[in-house]
Amino acid sequence: MKNGKDFGLDLAVIGNGQTAALLEPASRLVWWCYPRFDGDPIFSRLVAGDEEKGFSDVVLDGMVDYASDYERNTAVVSTVLTDKNGAAVKITDFAPRFYNFGRIFRPPQLIRIIEPVAGLPRIAIRLRPTCGYGQPIAERSIGSNHITYRGSGLAVRLTTDGPLSYIDKEASFVLTKPIHMMLGPDESMTGDIVTTCREFADRTRDYWTSWVRRLSIAYDWQEAIIRAAIALKLSNFEETGGIVAALTTSIPEAPGSGRTWDYRFCWLRDAYFVVKALNRLGASKTMEGFISFILGIASEDKLRPVYGVVPTDQLDERIAPDLAGYRGDGPVRVGNDAVNQNQHDTFGSIILAAMPMFFDRRLPRPGNEGLFQLLEMLGEKAEALAFEPDAGIWEYRGRTLVHTYSAAMCWAGCSRLAAIAAHLGLPGRAAHWAKIADRLQSTLLERAWSEKRGAFTVGFGADELDASVLLLPDIGLIEPSDARFVSTVAAIEKELRRGQHMMRYANSDDFGMPEAAFLTCRFWLIDAWWWLGRREEAHELFVDALGHRNRYGLLAEDIHPQTGEMWGNFPQTYSMAGLILTAMRLSRSWEDRYWRG
């Protein structure tokens, strides 16, 4: 097995910007929401507890080994299963994505190709879809070359040149020639399935390798950056431009914690981190699409902190009773009550995300005075609410506070409006926003500071420390060399660091004391060390962080400090964006390491 240590959530993602699925290293598909990221999971085994439902796999008789990895610079997964006699089968999984007639072809479809590569492997193909969040689909009809599964207003078709009777009965048979499987809408296939699947595979590989070729990446850790970039791309619902926080719901933050949330939605807060990462990568089309998604929402009278990939969708939270949870650890939630919270960092996040529209000359449609006026409306809200209590970056459900990070992002929004106004040649507006930003900054630095703790704390009048304040130099609120920030980093290290890992905070919340460390907080600490000149320590901690990726190079939201197991929704956009930004910051330059030898 490649990278044999299991860190938990040892899953690969395949997708195409319309749909995405997760599969285990032995090629079992365990999660696939249909027809889009936030849809009903046809494959729900990931959160089905001990129930053997909601999956598709290839069972090799007498299997003793497996190896699985992405094909280089693609979102195509190749898996080889080997039995005790040396017979082997190769499984290729992907979601088709390529240019066709000048447009991107990205249907809600998965393709699997199963090939014998050694001996006479005996296999069984199992397909057990669910609907209605965990209810097995019992109704199916068999045609000459397909099986259609129907339930709860859902119909999905398997088209294949494999033996339908064996597949329907999950009976084993000797694999003597390749089998092609196409799973998606209940539509007749007009072409030859062998030619179609092979052509789709080749064109999908070509798409991804071409996309990667256009990225701007650092010299060091190229493979890690490329894989993280592809993961961000796979989290982009291209039709609207939204980027989801993760592709799953209800993977607990820690075992038995009850901290299970639905992350298949778009948080406005993520805009700042994701746009910054995409900008550094040069992935300008994806970045521009996400900015357009955000700005399409920005004109609403009352902004919500989180939206569906279709922004008008309702996100009311409910429990899915037919799914027992990841490893039986529920509840499984659909929707997210954070939609009803006040999170004031949202205003600044949108303004910062819009900055490239004014300053990045690669974008074909630059920001103008009309867009600036829209952003000014957000700035007015940021000014008014900067020092009002909210739920904060960690979305506390049982308390509100004037959170330092929320107030800092409100300041950042006003500060950037001054920069945009100056860029547009509007000196009066630039002076107006600069004056507001100065006032917010002065009050914020005074009231967020705790003499008792010798640090900037989680919020005004609070003593608790919070990892989010490590971002204050990143947004320009304070210089890294400021003695107060140096002291804050030292205090946070002492209180929130657990070995090589970082907690978000160490105080009790709505669900008790937090148990898991937050992966992206480690990247924030590494960045802080880098700013403070602790470059060698930063490098070592980053290299250690890379060792916690799963065999496919992906990260979840959380990691258990004692066991090293990953927990939380997967793959986590925050974590992958953090990896990219920190790698780009720490890397040696191409000039020094490549051109000059």
Image: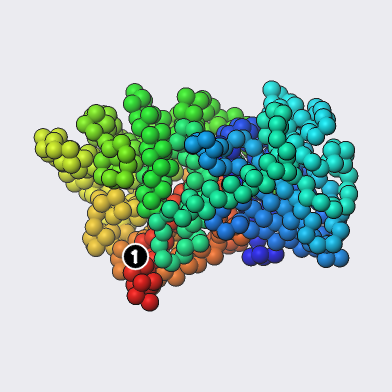
Give the residue displayed 40% in from the left and 62% down from the top: 218
Find disc 1 in the rendering and name its residue.
530
Q: Position of residue 437 (x, y in %)?
A: 19, 42
- Quadrant assignment for the C terminus: bottom left
Q: Quadrant of residue 52?
A: top right
Q: Secondary structure at mark 1?
A: helix
Give the residue displayed 63% in from the left and 47% down from the top: 201
Q: Quadrant of residue 414?
A: top left
* 526 and 121: which is toward the camera: 121
Q: Is residue 133 left or right of residue 516?
A: right
* 58 and 431: which is toward the camera: 58
Q: Is residue 55 above or below residue 465?
A: above
Q: Is residue 32 left or right of residue 372?
A: right
Q: Position of residue 20 (x, y in %)?
A: 60, 41
Give the residue displayed 13% in from the left and 38% down from the top: 425
- Quadrant assignment for the N terminus: bottom right
Q: Is residue 526 left or right of residue 325?
A: left
Give the residue displayed 61% in from the left and 42% down from the top: 96
Q: Is residue 479 above or below residue 396?
A: below
Instruction: Answer whether residue 407 is visible to the viewer in this image.
Output: no
Mark 1 crowd level (few <14, some 14–19, many ≥20, 10 Å Cα): some
Q: Give, as a three-letter code, the residue at label 1.
A: Trp
